[in-house]
Image (spheres, coloured by chain):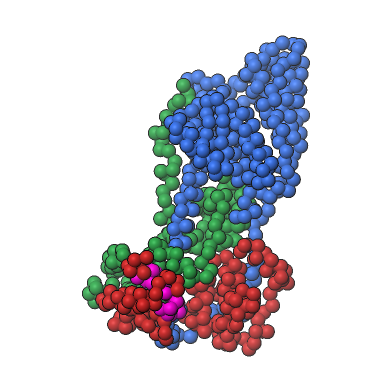
Chain colours: A blue, B green, C red
Amino acid sequence: MDLSLEESADVNAASGAFSVHLDNFDGPFDLLLQLISRHKMDITEISLSLVTDEFIAFIRSLEASGEGWRLDQATEFLVVAATLLDLKAARLLPSGEVDDEEDLALLEARDILFARLLQYRAFKEIAATFSERIITADKFFPRVVALDPTLSALLPEVLIGVGPQRFAAIAERVLTPKTIPLVSVEHLHLPLVSVAEESRLVVEALRRSKSMSFRNLVSDADNTLVVVARFLALLDLYRQGVLRFDQVVALGELQISWTGSQEGDVEVTDEFDIPVFLVQDEPSEGSANV
Amino acid sequence: MSNLEVERSIEAILMVVDEPVSEVILAQVLEKPVEEIEIALAHLITTYDDRGFALRKVNGGWRFYSNPDYHAAVEKFVLDGQQSRLTQAALETLSVIAYRQPVSRARVSAIRGVNVEAVMKTLVTRGLVEESGIEHESGAILYKTTSYFLERLGLSSLEDLPALAPYLPNLDGLDEILDSLTD
Amino acid sequence: MSNLEVERSIEAILMVVDEPVSEVILAQVLEKPVEEIEIALAHLITTYDDRGFALRKVNGGWRFYSNPDYHAAVEKFVLDGQQSRLTQAALETLSVIAYRQPVSRARVSAIRGVNVEAVMKTLVTRGLVEESGIEHESGAILYKTTSYFLERLGLSSLEDLPALAPYLPNLDGLDEILDSLTD
């Protein structure tokens, strides 16, 4: 396996694709994904923040080399990384026997995550076969000949079948450039939210009231990003064992109780706060040279 | 009309047509059952095995094509034969639409995990994808592939698309993965 | 390139050309002496003895034709299969030519988003469209509508074509967009 792995890593390095170099894995990103989806590797053993660091370094090196952003790779990385993060979160959450509805719901959620990941991969592979088919089909040249004059003389008078007005309407439709409706992208430019900052606020609030519902904890959040950041902060604090979750019924009120010290510093994660510099007016995927 | 005459007549017709011809039309013109036409076409194909041309069914109709083995020689004659290549992003988006049609842009976006607006626009402009009505609940525009798409892929109909199943693991495999997760 | 490959390459080329091709041109493309091409053509003819098509030299060039023995089937096909009414694709292509004439086939293709080669041939065959000189920069053949087209549409001159909506991009803008697409 080591040999084949190195080989494919080399091939990928040559083609300029993104590779990952971890203690327990060294090779192309796509292979990492394959191993995880075939369960040859445990998702919990992969440091996503390290993979992310490497990816950012990869993008930076492309920038430095003058090649610029590889948007196709960046977007692909983001979708796969987001799914892996989902998976990892699901894997890290405590789970016992599948004997009540909550566990079943959790299992279903994982099922969906895997299905999504696999579906994404399936379409990627199908796209490769499309490409091959088009290349093959382009080598076949059809016989396209005009009808022989002796034969066309046999034809009845041609019937255009529409009047001048209808004919003009057809021309208008055909000559109008084909466009599809635009989608607002304003939501992509929300101010950045720091998980570390939100984490401090969460600790403060919990020390103050000992126990509170998640609903109350995020009641003053003015956008979804803040809600997400506080939730990530809670997961991290839970890992440190300074709080407890209680949820009586599935999808019911999530109650959080502080079990940590009343004073002193609580370790605040910076795992989620890797700075990302967005380039304004970057063309969206594929607009350049499709 | 003997079998041989049916085959020769089909050859004669396909030599003058400017559009692909279906078995049904050939059957009507030659006054033979469609099955007999299908047998004749299948046999004709085998007689061209070692020729510079080939008989193919694309987009529901039959016509003569040059043999792809000799495409280099043909290309010298065909001036605007060069087709521009699709990008990886366009190919992936096209494959989602092909297998999920009719499908809204939002749904394609969800599967691909990225905004597909620009790519969809290109696919529509290139004539590979077209609008196909409105989704009732959401009011979103639905998209499907065109007959030109079939032509470009050399497919006779959408049913000839390769099955998606082999690219997705079977249920047993998925169960195994799920079992290991609950360890 | 072996004798067999020369023959197959000639078959592949002649299967897709519309105009007859001379031995000299075939010799240039295949980089073989003219004598060798002549021998190959002579041999090819004998291999089509019992086919529905034939290879013939007409007007100094070679082309595939239907075998006259099956003329009845071909005639019946032309009369039965061809509709006197234009297809949607033919109508759309005709409308582009009518409003953008004189126009090259490549430009019509770019506007329609699909290959219009076959449809253009039909329009020329049906006498609705004809050649109208050469585009200076590209050397491409330009096409325009015929007086028969006006007659069939019930118009006395091109000026009687209904005006298109003013919001359509003018020719300059459209050209820019099209050029960027066909790069």
Between C115 and A241, the one lying in front of the other is: C115
Rendering coords of residue A157 (x, y %): 48, 85
Q: Is residue C23 magenta?
A: yes
At a point 76% along the width and 37% down the height, the residue shown is A191
Q: Is residue A48 magenta?
A: no
Provide the major secondary structure of the magenta segment. helix
Rendering coords of residue B153 (x, y %): 46, 58
Using the rendered view, name the quadrant where residue C26 is placed: bottom left
Rendering coords of residue A278 (x, y %): 72, 41
Above or below B54: residue B137:
above
Above or below C141: residue C183:
above
At a point 61% along the width and 74% down the height, the residue shown is C138
Q: Magenta part of the protein: which range? A: C7-27
Rendering coords of residue A158 (x, y %): 50, 83
Residue B140 located left or right of residue A34 = right
Q: Is residue A182 visible?
A: yes
Q: Is residue B138 visible?
A: no
At a point 70% along the width and 17% down the height, the residue shown is A267
Quarter in which the N terminus of chain A is drawn? top left
Residue C127 located left or right of residue C134 = left
Residue C173 located left or right of residue C16 = right
Between B7 and A115, the one lying in front of the other is: B7
At a point 71% along the width and 27% down the height, the residue shown is A195
Above or below A108: residue B82:
below
Using the rendered view, name the quadrant where residue A279 is placed: top right
